[in-house]
Each structure stands twice: as C-alpha cells, then as structure tokens.
C-alpha cells in the first residue's frame, strides 16, 4: 500500500500532489479525442444543463458560469438529485451534460436518463470511460486524470474544470461572433499544469498556517464572488468531509444579508480572490476585519494590495497566470488546507466517516 501511495502518507495527499501530471494528461487526452459531434450539438443547443453531485457539481457550476460569461449561452448547473426542478421544461434541442468522476453516481445517472427520455441530448464528462453514465450517454468526453482512490475528490475536480473550459474554448474557436480569444484560452488551459506545480510549492507552508488556525475551530466561512463561489464551495466541502468542521461557502456580497451575524473575534473567514469580476471582495474583507475575524485570502501574487494585504492574517499568493489557469488551479490551496487540518486533528483523510467514494443508492 505504501508503494501505491507513492511514498505519501495518504492517497489524498498523493492525488493533490499529482495534479500537475493529471492536468497534463487530461489536456493531451482531450486533444486526441474527436469532439466534433459534442461541439456540434452544444453549438446548436437551445439550452445547456450541467448536472452533477458534490465536487462534480462545483466544477459544473464553474463551467456553467463560463458558458454564460465566455460564450453568452444559456447554461445552468443543477444538483443531479434536484434535476426534477427543471425536468418538465427540458426538451428536444437541449443538451444535458453529466459530470461524474466515477460515472456511477446514481442521481446523475437518473437525471441523464430522464433528460434523454424527454428528448434532450446527453454528454458525459467522466474519468471512467467504461462507466454506466458513459455507456448510457449519447456522447462521452473522457478526462483520463488517472485513478482517484481517496474519498475526497481532488485531482478530478481540477481536471473537470479544465475539461469544461477546454470545451468552451473549442466552441469559441468555432464561432466568429464570440469575442473570446480562443487561442489564448487554450494556452491558459494548457499552462495549468505548470502553474499547478508552482501553486503546490508556494502554498504548502501557508496552507499549513491556515490549518493551524482551523483545526481548533468549529466553523468557518469560505467567500468568493462569481467564479470564486464554486471554488469556495469546493473548499468548504473538503473541510467538512475530512476535517469534520462546519464550513459554509457563499457569495461574499451576501455577508451583510445575514451570515455576518455569526462573525466575531477570531472567526475564520477564507476569501477566494480570483482577480476577475470580484474586486468588491476588498470591501468584504474590511467588513469582516471590522468584526475582528481571522482572515486568510487566496489571491494572485500580482494583485495582493489594498485590504487584501492590509487585513488578511495569511495571504496565499498564487502564481501570476491567465484567468483560465487561475480557475483551474485555485482549488489546490483549499485542498491542502483541508488535508492539513484533518491530519492536525489526527483524522485519516482517506477514510472519512459516513462517506463512500461513489454513491450508488438514491
Ligand atoms: C467529493 O469529495 C465527494 N466525495 C463527493 O461529493 C463526490 O464528488 C460526489 O459523490 C460525486 O461523485 P462523482 O463525481 O463520482 O459522480
């Protein structure tokens, strides 16, 4: 088993550390797949739904924001077990993308089946191309991120984000009407493996410093804006899953609408600052500081200024990189924070209580 863990104490850490390799693999595998049919149906889609559970849902949320923002198309991410909220309006001409690492999650499978029955086309984005979801979908996009053993998904999240952004860049390439530099976008996506490597080395010590604070706490907030929201949600899910600490993520602008009532001296708040459409986070950091919160901020190294610099107890400075690269790599320090917090609490992050790697029961 130690050999399988590649010298790391846990599968989870091994999988976090192998993200540069997994991202490179996913990128080259996408380049060798014939995506022409998938791109054609997406191009002509009336509406796009991205359905998934857990971590895969967070990647889907980010993907749906990117579909809307970069392509201006009507896209929505849905939790697969809640698919019935829209199933009456799904129809012929719609495309439903199911995102699933295992390809076996029952809720996602059932949502895709229902979508197909209603005449929509289905696309599976999976890590296992031989899975049930892959077999039952009209089209399959395979990530080839390598096996993920730890219950908490890590490398498959970053590979899912890469895959969704790659599809979006390819769609942008096909349409002259879209004002997106698809070449630059593909370049940014490709760079993610190098930046992931740098991010891993620069963020370890700081992630440990955040973990040192969190492991004594019962609750934490993860806040972001726009693209930072699904990344915050993923960070909070990781902390809950393996460190058993209540963590809540929401859009930073919502703070003053209620959640800030919980914040008092030393309450941990983690900000995810992407540096795109989220400049108002500076004000949210100030609001939290005024309540004497303990603040950690993840931000691009070239954008650490103002209240980020002034009020954050810890700043995790991410390498300078294009937007797409940032979207793919910003979950990395959050994964490390959760991992170190769990180990400081003496927990085994590979075997979180009450959880299974794949949920095949409704
Ligand atoms: C991730 O850390 C979780 N263990 C869980 O939320 C998982 O992402 C979810 O069950 C979906 O799994 P899938 O990607 O295999 O469909």
Image (cartoon, rainbow, N blue to C red):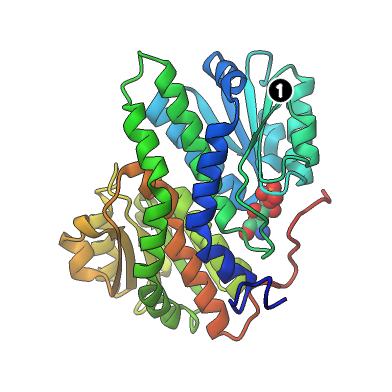
Q: Is residue 78 found left or right of 326 in the rendered image? A: right
Q: Quadrant of residue 268?
A: bottom left
| Disc 1 crowd, CA 10 A, few/some/many (<14, 14-19, 20+) | few
Q: Position of residue 176 (x, y in %)?
A: 36, 13
Q: Closest to the observer: 271 or 173?
A: 173
Q: Is residue 254 found left or right of 112 in the rendered image? A: left
Element assignment for label 1: loop
Report the residue marked by disc 1: 88
Q: Position of residue 193 (x, y in %)?
A: 43, 52
Q: Is residue 146 above or below residue 285?
A: above
Q: Is residue 44 above or below residue 208?
A: above
- Residue occupying the point 51% across, 62% down: 236
Q: Is residue 127 found left or right of 75 in the rendered image? A: right
Q: Position of residue 263 (x, y in %)?
A: 39, 70
Q: Quadrant of residue 131?
A: top right
- Residue occupying the point 48% across, 69% down: 336
Q: Closest to the observer: 35 or 300?
A: 35
Answer whether residue 87 is visible to the viewer in this image. yes
Q: Is residue 8 above or below residue 233?
A: below
């Amino acid at each position: 088993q130690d050999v399988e863990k590649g010298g790391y104490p846990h599968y989870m850490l091994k999988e976090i550390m192998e993200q540069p390799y997994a991202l490179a693999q996913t990128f080259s595998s996408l380049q060798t797949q014939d995506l022409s049919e998938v791109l054609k149906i997406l191009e002509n889609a009336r509406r796009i739904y991205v359905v998934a559970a857990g971590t895969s849902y967070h990647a889907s949320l980010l993907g749906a924001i990117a579909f809307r923002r970069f392509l201006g198309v009507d896209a929505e991410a849905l939790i697969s077990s809640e698919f019935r909220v829209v199933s009456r309006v799904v129809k012929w001409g719609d495309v439903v993308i199911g995102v699933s690492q295992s390809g076996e999650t029952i809720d996602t499978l059932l949502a895709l089946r229902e979508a197909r029955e209603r005449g929509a086309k289905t696309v599976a984005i999976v890590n296992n191309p031989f899975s049930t979801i892959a077999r039952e979908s009209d089209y399959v996009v395979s990530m080839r991120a390598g096996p993920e053993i730890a219950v908490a998904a890590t490398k498959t999240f970053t590979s899912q984000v890469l895959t969704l952004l790659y599809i979006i860049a390819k769609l942008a390439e096909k349409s002259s009407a879209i004002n997106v530099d698809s070449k630059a976008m593909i370049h940014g996506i490709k760079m993610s493996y190098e930046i992931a490597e740098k991010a891993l080395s620069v963020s370890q010590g700081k992630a440990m410093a955040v973990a040192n604070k969190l492991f004594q706490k019962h609750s934490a907030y993860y806040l972001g804006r726009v693209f930072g929201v699904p990344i915050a949600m993923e960070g909070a899910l990781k902390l809950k899953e393996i460190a058993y600490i209540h963590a809540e993520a929401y859009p930073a602008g919502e703070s003053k609408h209620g959640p800030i009532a919980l914040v008092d001296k030393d309450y941990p708040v983690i900000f995810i600052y992407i540096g795109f459409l989220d400049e108002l986070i500076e004000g949210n950091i100030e609001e939290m500081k005024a309540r004497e919160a303990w603040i950690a901020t993840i931000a691009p190294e070239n954008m650490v200024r103002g209240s980020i610099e002034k009020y954050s107890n810890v700043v995790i400075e991410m390498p300078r990189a294009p937007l797409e690269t940032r979207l793919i790599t910003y979950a990395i320090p959050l994964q490390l924070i959760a991992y170190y917090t769990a180990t400081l609490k003496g927990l085994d992050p590979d075997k979180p209580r009450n959880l299974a790697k794949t949920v095949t029961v409704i």
